[in-house]
Each structure stands twice: as C-alpha cells, then as structure tokens.
C-alpha cells in the first residue's frame, strides 16, 4: 500500500475487485515486490492497477515505467492502463502519445504523472531520468543484467518502488530476487508465489484439462508456478549434438537445404545438411534485396551439388519462392501454419532426441545454438500451448534447420506432447 490515496475507493471506482492474492500485493508496503505466479493469475491486471494508483498519487510530477523483454510484452500492462484510464479516468487524461507508448494523467493534486512502456531489448532506451516506480512484466525472461545494471539504479534518486511480475522460469536471477522476499531475508523485499488456480475468475476445469495435455514439468511451471529447471525447453541435448564442423561439398553426396526468409526485422537463414544428417553449411543475412538473396541462396545450393531446398512460402515468401523457381533453384514450398510449423518442430526435436542430427559447434554457429536452446513451450493468452522463441526473439535458424530436416525420411516416435 505504497502511497496515500484510498485504494479501496479507487478500485471500486475502477470496477476492480482484487482477488485475495492480488489484495496482498496491493496492501504490501515493501519497496520491492516480486510476484511469481502461474499464467493467467492476474499479474498484469494487478500491476496495471498499481501503476494507475501510483499515477494518481498527489505530487508535482511522477514518472513510472512498465518494462518487459519486448515492446509487445510491455504493451500488455500498458494497454490495460490506457484502457482502464479511457474508461474510468477520461477526465484525468492529459496526453496519450501512442508512438511513444506514453500516457500522462492529472493526479489528485493537479500534478502530472507519466506512465511509459519500455522494451528491455534496447537497453540504451532505459537510460535517463529518475523514476518514481518501475513495473517489470515477464521479468524472468529479462536478461539478468537489465534489472541490476539499468532499472534498479533509476529508482535511487526518488526512492522509487518496483513491482516485478512473472511466471517462474528456472532458477535464474528472478528466482534469486524472489527468494530475497521470502522468510524476512531482506526487509525491502516481499514476494509471493501462487498457482493459476488461485485466480477465482479462471475456469478450474480448463486448467485440469491442461494438466493432461502438457508435459508434467511444463504444467508445473506454467500453471502451478513451480521453480522447475529447464521445463520450457522444446529441444533437448542441443549442446550434446553441437559437435560438428562445417564441411565443403563432396562429389557424389546428396545435400538438403532449408531457407527461412526474412520478414520485417529478422534474418534470412539458409541451412544445408548432408545425407549423414550433419549440418555442413549455414548462412544468415538481412537487409539485402530479394534478387541478391536469391542469387546468394542459389550459389550455395549449386555448390552443394544442387541441393534441393524447402522454403517458407508464407507471406513475403510466396513471390520470392516463384522467383527462386525462375532462377532455376530446385525449391519446394512449405507454407507455415500453426500445424505445419508444429510438425517441423516436432520432427527436429525428435532428431535431436534420438541423436540423429549433428549440429555445428556453438563457436561456429552461436546464433543457431542459442535459438535452439531458447525455443520454448508457452501458454498463449487463449490458453493454448505453443512452441516459440521467447518473447519476440528470432527463430529463423530453428525454422531453416527444421526445413532442411524435412527432406529426411520420417523418424518414428514421439517426444513429450506437442501442441499447436
Ligand atoms: N480481480 C480480477 N477481477 C476480474 N478479472 C480478473 C481479476 N484478476 C484477473 N482477472 C482476469 O484474469 C485473466 C488473467 O489476468 P492477467 O492477464 O492479468 O493475468 P496474468 O497473470 O498477467 O496472465 P499471463 O500469465 O497470461 O500474463 C484476465 O482475463 C483478467 O481480466
Ligand atoms: Mg501478464
């Protein structure tokens, strides 16, 4: 209950009735609050209400940030804030600047209070002024250096408070700060850990249905909020399989290629395998025009004995695929849908699991090995389980490798449970 305004009355005005777990967070006076709970527990809503309460506190000027690993994730709390403000506090809105993801409210004493969404994937944007408070959403996915190196320092001048919220994700830095709030270890910290089920607005039956669909470790992490190590990883044994070197083409060998074409911000990645399922060639480039990209891809495929190529033909891929055929590449389209991508990921996972794929060593293909290791299960807002790169990071190496492996004869068996 940091601050002086009557929260009970404010929440009633905002038509928000915190559930018992959320109430504990709102009542806490700790300058550092750490909330590690299962998905859909109500963390973001609770944080949005904290931001609004803070912004209404009487003062000349206050500035608060909502930070997350990417803009998309930071938008979750920020959108909730602007939505609630537009609905219940319209008379207090001074400015909304969507391009800067900033809203300014007139607080209870007529001063101005600013709330901004910030992405931690661009640390230089985290430099600057002293903050009255910071809210970190999906904190466990943040690089460890961001909290210590960039955010906590912003709070010193104004003796600001912090609320860090996340679903647990292994025992990394977020676990460490959560522990500081347990059993009175650090008087500045208070922390909580609740399962999704403690949100009374969630359908308990749906959660139970997820229990049977999901690998146990994933369910425990995502819904029970347990601190499980490595639960979300989709590809296992990545480092064990990363023992190979790139190889020059050999006469008489058959080669298989996969290419994932750049969308707006990511890379085009080309991966070539030999018939012994060893990755022999990788290439990664962006901001080249399509003709140059096609020339570069064709040169590599030609060199590897006219390797046949699977290409992601979704969206921008379609005309590029046509142009590839025109350029004489032996290309086959592979349109990405949730289902087709899941099949690709499944197959790749199985090859790694069964020790049927040799990847280049991590010093040769660092971005590929990192992407494979980071690729994870997560639960979408609609409650579906999906596999993806964490929080808006790239997955183009994974996709290109998956496409190259799609040429191989099917492997039998299943690994865990794969969902769309
Ligand atoms: N006190 C409340 N009253 C009514 N609905 C609530 C309350 N708390 C949470 N909810 C609802 O529960 C759902 C999940 O809330 P929210 O998105 O805040 O959870 P979360 O823990 O941030 O989820 P995620 O793990 O997906 O980020 C939303 O539909 C939200 O409106
Ligand atoms: Mg959330």
Image: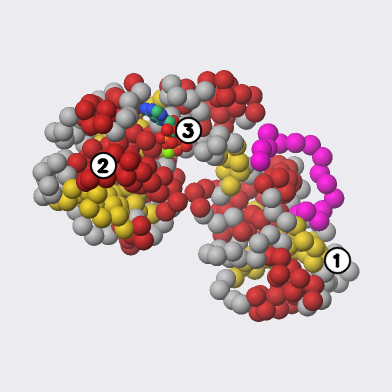
Give me the C-alpha separation between circle 2 and circle 1: 69 Å
The mark lying in front, picked from 3 and 2, is 2
Which residue is rendered at x = 23% and y = 37% of the image? Answer: 53
Give me the C-alpha separation between circle 3 and circle 2: 28 Å
Q: Nearer the viewer, residue 385 or 358?
A: 385
Q: x, y percentage for residue 286?
A: 57, 71
Q: Nearer the viewer, residue 175 or 82?
A: 82
Instruction: Examine the structure image and report whether residue 104 is included in the region drawn in magenta.
Output: no
Please give the residue where the numbered disc 1 appears in the rendered image: 253
Give me the C-alpha separation between circle 1 and circle 3: 49 Å
Please give the residue where the numbered disc 2 appears in the rendered image: 89
* Furthest residue toward front: 91
**Distance from mark 3 CB to nearest ligand 1 atom below 8 Å:** yes
Earlier residue among tags 1 and 3: 3
Q: x, y percentage for residue 95?
A: 26, 55
Earlier residue among tags 3 and 2: 3
> Which SS does the magenta portion mostly show?
loop
Q: Would you say residue 66 is visible in this rendering?
A: yes
Q: Is residue 182 left or right of residue 273?
A: left
Indicate the quadrant containing the N terminus: top left, top right, bottom left or bottom right.
top left
The mark lying in front, picked from 2 and 1, is 2
In what element is the residue under mark 3?
A: loop
Mark 1 neighbour class, 10 Å CA radius: few under 14, some 14 to 19, many 20 or more? few
Please give the residue where the numbered disc 3 appears in the rendered image: 39
The span picked out in magenta is 403-420
Indicate the quadrant containing the C terminus: top left, top right, bottom left or bottom right.
top right
The mark lying in front, picked from 1 and 3, is 3
Please say if the residues under marks 1 and 3 sit with CB atoms less than 8 Å apart: no
Quadrant of residue 261 within the rendered picture: bottom right
């Amino acid at each position: 209950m940091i601050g002086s305004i009557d929260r009970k009355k404010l929440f009633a005005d905002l038509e928000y009735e915190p559930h018992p777990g959320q109430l504990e967070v709102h009542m806490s006076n700790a300058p550092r609050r750490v909330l590690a709970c299962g998905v859909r527990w109500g963390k973001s809503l609770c944080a949005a209400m904290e931001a609004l309460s803070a912004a209404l506190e009487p003062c000349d000027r206050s500035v608060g940030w909502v930070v997350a690993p990417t803009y998309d994730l930071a938008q979750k709390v920020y959108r909730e804030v602007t939505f609630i403000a537009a609905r219940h506090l319209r008379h207090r809105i001074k400015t909304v600047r969507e391009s800067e993801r900033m809203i300014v409210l007139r607080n209870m004493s007529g001063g101005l209070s600013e709330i901004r969404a910030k992405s931690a994937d661009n640390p230089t944007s985290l430099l600057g002024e002293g903050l009255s408070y910071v809210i970190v959403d999906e904190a466990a996915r943040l690089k460890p250096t961001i909290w210590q190196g960039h955010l906590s320092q912003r709070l010193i001048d104004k003796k600001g408070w912090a609320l860090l919220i996340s679903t647990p994700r292994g025992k990394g830095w977020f676990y460490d700060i959560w522990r500081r709030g347990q059993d009175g270890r650090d008087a500045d910290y208070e922390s909580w850990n609740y399962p999704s089920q403690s949100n009374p607005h969630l359908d308990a039956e749906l959660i139970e249905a997820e229990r049977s669909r999901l690998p146990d470790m994933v369910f425990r992490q995502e819904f029970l909020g347990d601190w499980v190590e490595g639960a979300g990883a989709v590809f296992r044994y990545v480092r064990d399989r990363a023992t190979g070197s790139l190889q020059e083409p050999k006469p008489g060998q058959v080669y298989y290629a996969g290419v994932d074409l750049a969308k707006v911000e990511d890379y085009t990645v080309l991966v070539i395998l030999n018939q012994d399922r060893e990755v022999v060639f990788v290439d990664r480039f962006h901001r080249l025009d399509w003709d140059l990209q096609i020339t570069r891809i064709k040169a590599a495929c030609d060199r590897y004995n006219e390797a046949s190529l699977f290409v992601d033909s979704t969206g921008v891929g379609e005309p590029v695929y046509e142009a590839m055929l025109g350029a004489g590449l032996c290309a086959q389209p592979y349109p990405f849908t949730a289902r087709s991508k899941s099949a690709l990921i499944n197959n790749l996972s199985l090859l790694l699991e069964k020790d049927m794929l040799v990847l280049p060593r991590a010093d040769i293909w660092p971005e590929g090995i990192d992407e494979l290791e980071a690729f994870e299960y997560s639960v979408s807002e609609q409650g579906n389980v999906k596999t993806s790169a964490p929080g808006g990071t790239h997955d183009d190496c994974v996709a290109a490798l998956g496409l190259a492996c799609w040429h191989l004869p099917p492997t039998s068996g299943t690994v865990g449970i794969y969902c769309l």
